[in-house]
Amino acid sequence: MLADVWLVTDKDLRIEWRSRVTLSQVVPFALTVLVLFGFALDANRGVLNAATSGLFWLTVLFVTVVAVARSTAIETADGARRALLLAGIEPAAVFFGKTLAVALQLLGVEILMVGGVLVFYGTTVESLPLLLATCAVATVGIAASGTLLGALVAGVRARETVLPILLLPLLAPVLIAASRAFDDALGVLAVDGWAWLGLLGGFGVVNAALGTLAYGRLLEEA
């Protein structure tokens, strides 16, 4: 199963690398949103510093919509989804493979965004382990829920519109928990970031379990 998971992940990453969508569209979009937020709140540095964590993860959610839509489009083109079913790969392996591919893309964008926040907003990192752990755990949960919803709306004609309507409210707990953990990592608020990280881990486990159980049926119906 691990070989099948990596096979699906490698397929999606190769397609992204050849298309350059992430590098040419997603990364500039993310950095532009961060810069615009900075310009909007630059008149009040205190508000900008307090809102940095929320702005960071709100931008990540916007990027997630683009990444999940792209991941879903890969499987809807040229009968690729049917080919996956006929290949004999377990649906759970397809789910985890696509989740891993989306997560790796998001992590790459987040690394650049962290650099952008440090440069544009002038913030400092007080707990690098907490910051890195928050990015990793939150991204896994985001990618799992996005992959699951991507399969759910794959057969819908207006999936580009339906996907963000369903995905963004679902990821509201991630936005709250990841922002609080980032507040602790950046030294903005005196909160227990590791406790919020545990909540993010629970969110990821639940979505991974749901994907394992439901992805096969969604793949067949789509």
Image (cartoon, grey):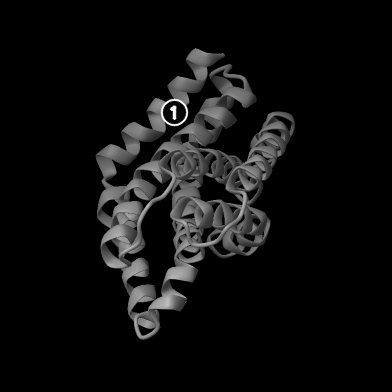
User: Relative to 139, does residue 7 appear above or below in the rendering?
Assistant: above
Q: Quadrant of the N terminus?
A: top right
Q: Is residue 102 above or below residue 53?
A: above
In this rendering, position of residue 127 left or right of residue 174: left
Q: Total of numbered circles in the picture?
A: 1
> Residue at horizontal 35%, vertical 56%?
124
Reading the image, the residue beneath label 1 is: 9
Determine which quarter of the picture holds residue 77.
Answer: top left
Within 10 angstroms of label 1, few (less than 14), some, or many (20 or more) residues? many
The residue that appears at 44% across and 45% down in the rendered structure is 127
Camera-side residue: 177 or 220?
A: 177
Image vertical order of residue 58 relative to residue 193, above or below: below
Q: Quadrant of residue 24?
A: bottom left
**Camera-nearest residue between 75 and 24:** 24
Residue ID at (49%, 62%): 188
Residue 119: image x %, image y %?
26, 61
Q: Is residue 56 left or right of residue 138?
A: left
Give the residue type at disc 1: Thr
Vertical position of residue 99 compared to residue 191: above or below: above
Compare residues 2 and 206 and report the one nearer the observer: 206
Element at label 1 = helix
Q: Is residue 71 left or right of residue 180?
A: left
Farthest residue in the front direction? 190
Picture residue at 36% right of the left edge, 67% below the top: 34
- Find residue 13 and report its horizontal and vertical position in percent: 36, 34
Q: Quadrant of the C terminus?
A: top right
In percent of width and height, residue 117 lies at: 34, 60
Residue 198 appears at what percent x and percent y? Answer: 66, 40
